[in-house]
Amino acid sequence: MSDEMYQLLAIIIYMAAMVFIGWYAFKRTASLTDYMLGGRSLGPAVTALSAGAADMSGWLLMGLPGAIYLSGLVEVWMAIGLTVGAYLNYVLVAPRLRVYTQVSNDSITIPSYLENRLKDKSRLLRIVSGIIILIFFTFYVSSGMVAGGKFFLSSFGLNYHVGLLIVSAVVIFYTLFGGFLAVSYTDVIQGIIMFFALLLVPIVGVFLTGGLSETAVSIREVNPQLLNFISGGSLLGIISAVTWGLGYFGQPHIIVRFMAIGSVKEVKKARRIGIGWMFLSLFGAVSTALVGIAYYQQNNAKLVDEETVFIVLGQIIFHPFIAGIMLAAVLAAVMSTISSQLIVTSSALIEDIYKAVVKSDASDKRYVFLGRMAVLIISIIAIVLAWPNDESILKIVSFSWAGFGAAFGPIILLSLYWRKITAKGALWGMLTGAITVMIWGNVKILTDTLYEIVPGFIMCWIVTYMVSLATYKRNDEIEKEFTEALEILKGES
């Protein structure tokens, strides 16, 4: 059997496992809460690993190692910012959001939570939130599908469109039928594959390069500044990289996991697992790049595409079947993010827009069916957007991260910690954050100076706070729920 066939066999086994998990989750999905939120039954390990896998995408295995390989440790500031942001998200958001979404009319999406928490009778806040999620995530999903098509093109020489359709078909199947449970369970498998792959490549690779000291010597021979954390980076550039961590507070596909965990008591366990997984995975990605620099220097060779350093080292170091599992790790990173975004986009369309606009007392079974149709429709639109293989669409990833972080982040935090936030304050703050990111992110001189999440986050916070103060009127129901949520937190912590 050829090396390529071994690798392809590993990919086929991986995809078959994803389909099986989708079928298994389908058997356990009965209600809309099951489909959209897994019945709030996730354990700490599933919560942590699914949040991590949904978060990291192909950036962890290709983008970050490629950036480190090219520019050195100055690129690690983004990883530091993301780790700190993820930790604070577990500490500041997870426990309160888990309790408050249940206390406030058992909310199962972020827009429905904001409407219920702020008692917005106009439904405008919920609809606008849903539209923002729907628009950004449709493009976000398409960027993942582009990455999937390119994966098969670069790894097996398969036609881009064939690869795009294969990845799309498998993700659509297990997301459409299995819903949130399928997405979460597949994320766990994908997270484990990513974790071990990112640790094995640099651990085994460093033996090929002669150990830690020889590896460091070889890197310095290429460029001594590659091991410098600040060389080549400006102060504003480092701030821009670190502030990626702000985005966590407003990412719907990540914080929805906190709403689904079994209880507040399990949040601490989830945090330890999640941050441990994240730290070691990021450390592995950085180490892979450094080992790659040393390996190619020692062998007097050149890597054609820096972002493939993880894949190429895996193929050099391991048996072709194991190398195929390494390839599956890259595919896992891409697919886990696509599926998470699809289920959140589906819930935004059905739970937050359709149910808010169309007065209906349809059964749960009917809404689950509509949720599945939403996954299919959004997927088809995303495939159409991804079909031209337009690389510019991949830029929407960082743009969308900033958009969600600035539009939702301050509002989520204020809604959990401040009694006086109002629906009007949240609506105007959300729009201000999103518009600031849109304007800033499309002016090159501004984006080259500072990442758009910083001004967007600050403007959203200021506007939400000022408008809320101007429009605040005491609401006994809000006061009661806020107090109840705090009491439950004290009792379960």
Image (tube, rainbow, N blue to C red):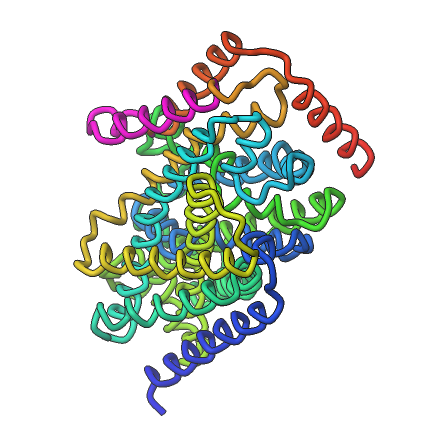
Q: Residue at x 40, y 33 (%)?
A: 128
| The C terminus - image quarter | top right
Percent of width and height locating residue 361: 54, 49
Percent of width and height locating residue 371: 46, 56
Q: Residue at x 43, y 33 (%)?
A: 405
- 39 in magenta: no
- 441 in magenta: yes
Percent of width and height locating residue 26: 55, 69
Q: Which residues are magenta?
A: 425-451
Q: Is residue 66 above or below residue 473?
A: below
Q: Kindly give the residue lying farthest to the top in the view shown.
A: 470
| The N terminus - image quarter | bottom left
444 displayed left or right of 295: left
Q: Is residue 368 above or below residue 230?
A: below
Question: In the image shown, does 359 or 59 lie closer to the viewer?
Answer: 359
Q: Kindly give the residue lying farthest to the bottom in the view shown.
A: 1
Q: Residue at x 49, y 37 (%)?
A: 111
Q: Is residue 244 above or below residue 64?
A: above
380 displayed left or right of 12: left
